[in-house]
Amino acid sequence: MANKYLHIHRLRRVYVWELPVRFYHWLNAGVILVLIITGFFISNPLALMSNAEATNQYTMGWVRYIHFIAAYLFFFNFLFRIYWGFVGNKYANWRQFIPVSKRFFKEMWTVFKIDILMLKKNGQQQDHLSVGHNAMAGFIYFLTFIVFLIQCLTGFGLYASMSDWWLPKMFAWFPAMLGGDIVTRQIHHWAMWFFILFAVVHVYLVFYHDYVEGRGEISSMGGGWKFIEEDVFEKNKHMTPNPEKNK
Amino acid sequence: MTNEVLPKQPTYYEEVQRKGYSRRDFVRFVSMMTAFIGLEQSAIGQVTTALETKPRLPVIWLHFQECTCCSESFIRSSHPIVADILLDKISLDYTETLMAASGFQAEEALHNTMTKYKGQYILCVEGSVPLAADGVYCMIGGKTSLQILEEAAEGAAAVIAWGSCASNGCVQSAKPNPTKATPIHKIIKNKPIIKVPGCPPIGEVMAGVIVHYLTFGRIPELDKLGRPKAFYSKRVHDTCYRRPFYDAGLFVESFDDANAKKGYCLYKVGCKGPSTYNACGVMKWNNGTSFPIQSGHPCIGCSEENFWDNGRFYERGSSFAGFGIEADADTFGKVALGITGAALVGHAVATNIGKSKFIKEHQQEGRESEHELKS
């Protein structure tokens, strides 16, 4: 029999991440990885010191080609995610990302106290349990979306002069506004570091939540399921910004 | 252009003949200019007619904060007629560097041109205008350059901003810009302004802009930054003869290596060709002899805005303001990554202490379930 001091949780399966969200997430992860690697190569190509004739090689050309293909995938994937923020379930809704309500800020502060400062309440350790993103995570993703936008504007802005297609040409105003390609290229490079730092913290926090909460945080981006304690489930319905309730 | 109202002036062709050039020389010049300004072969007739029938264009050429490299470049454009006719004739009205007159006479010539050809002359400006301390950093004939510019721009049909100084401010506007050197387009708002950036711009490009205006009576098509599309729509990189080495991934690693001797791409020693819009790779310099990349030096991006503050000439990455001369984005990024990593380790340790109760409970719960299933 169970230890009488031990509380055995009843977990409830919640479908948090829909298939399109998971698809977006992994495509985005893969494409960003490719963009970072090829981007580093483009900014500082390896010294090949080859004796081969230029006619027989296209190294830089291929790396750039891959970078541009990945950029297009990234761009359309990003657009799709914005679209899904309006038609997807409540965990994917745009309200999860943009702090518009007072409750959003309040929850961010709570997360900050519990997960970063690890403050205790009445001498007790606190367990903050949100089902989808917590408000802090949602806000950080909102910032990543802004960096996505910056990368699209600078990247396609630089690409515009090499392209005949109207789509990249639509970005030509951006380098012009910043005052030329040199500075645009620098911003593109600086912003890339945000992705690296983000990825490190993101992966760490996924492990952190899985470890501390034990609700299948890591696997949720595989099957879409999270496992929420029955008692928390009821309470939590009111804690996260819930777009369905606002209807 | 309403040339009829101008006082009787010789046409360009008449001037050419007077100078002793043959018809063949003239036609050769016309063909060259037509090609340079990006027109089809069929337009040669139109350009020829324009130069044969139109009287020479009154031009006022002002010099402010600059080094005169634009004028030097202009008088070295590949065809002698460019210098002889366009510059010699058009600019004699007033140009500090090349006019014969000086002092009162020169000021009078300037005044005459401004009143006689009001609304018709082209104002060429070489150099930026200092606005700090009421403009005392650049004064000519007792007037500040701002006063002179505003006065001369008043009756101009169009303004051509020659060179990076007039287009972007160039090195004298580098941080902290003590004289508040200001490019022309930030001062003159009500006139069409053609920016011809470069330090200096290519002579043929300068001549091409004037010939275009002369032939069609309107300024050439400009890009988003106000530069003539015919010359500034392509990057130096796109027309560079070393481009195949770039695409192949063959680079000069240092100026004294074998790759430099083989003429590989200068990208890794800081070439700004991929970020610079100019016609150097096509027109080249000094009668088409060479251009910086051809002589083994990376492009420094002299026709780009802020090239003087945008980082090092011999590296692709620029310095990171506020973090020392040697700190670039990647150094900064690596430091940030290290700090982040350390913070995460700290957080992981703190988690195991601060959340010990939960972690323990979960572990017990898990073990209990395992145990129950076994029994």
Image (cartoon, helix red, strand yellow):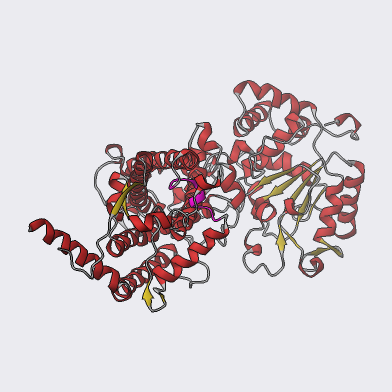
Q: Taken as a whole, is the magenta stretch helix, strand or loop?
A: loop
For the point 80% across and 60% down, the residue is B145
Q: Nearer the viewer, residue B260 or A41?
A: A41
- Which of the 4 image quadrants contains residue B82? top right
Viewer-side residue, A207 vs A177: A207
Q: Give the range drawn in magenta.
A: A91-99
Task: Answer yes or no: is residue B289 visible.
Answer: no
B57 relative to B357 in the view: left or right:
right
Residue B196 x/y as whole percent:
66, 46
Q: Quadrant of the C terminus of chain A?
A: top right
Extreme residue in the left direction: B375
Question: Residue B153: x percent and y percent?
Answer: 83, 48
Q: Going 65% across and 23% down the picture, which residue do you hit? A: B43
The single residue placed furthest to the bottom in the displayed view is A123
Residue at 87% across / 45% down in the picture?
B155
Image coords of residue B320 (percent x, y): 49, 66
Query: Which quadrant of the figure has residue A100?
Result: bottom right
Q: Give coordinates of residue B374: x percent, y percent.
A: 8, 57
Q: In which quarter of the image is residue A56?
A: top left
Is B20 left, or right, of A58 in this rendering?
Answer: right
Q: Would residue A130 be seen by someone viewing this image from the given angle?
A: yes
Magenta highlight on residue B58: no
- Front residue (pair B44, B236): B236
Residue B164 versus residue B158 in the image, above or below: below
Number of numbered markers: 0
Left or right: A245 as drawn, with respect to B144: left
Is A98 magenta? The answer is yes
Pick whichever, A99 or B199, lies toward us. Answer: A99
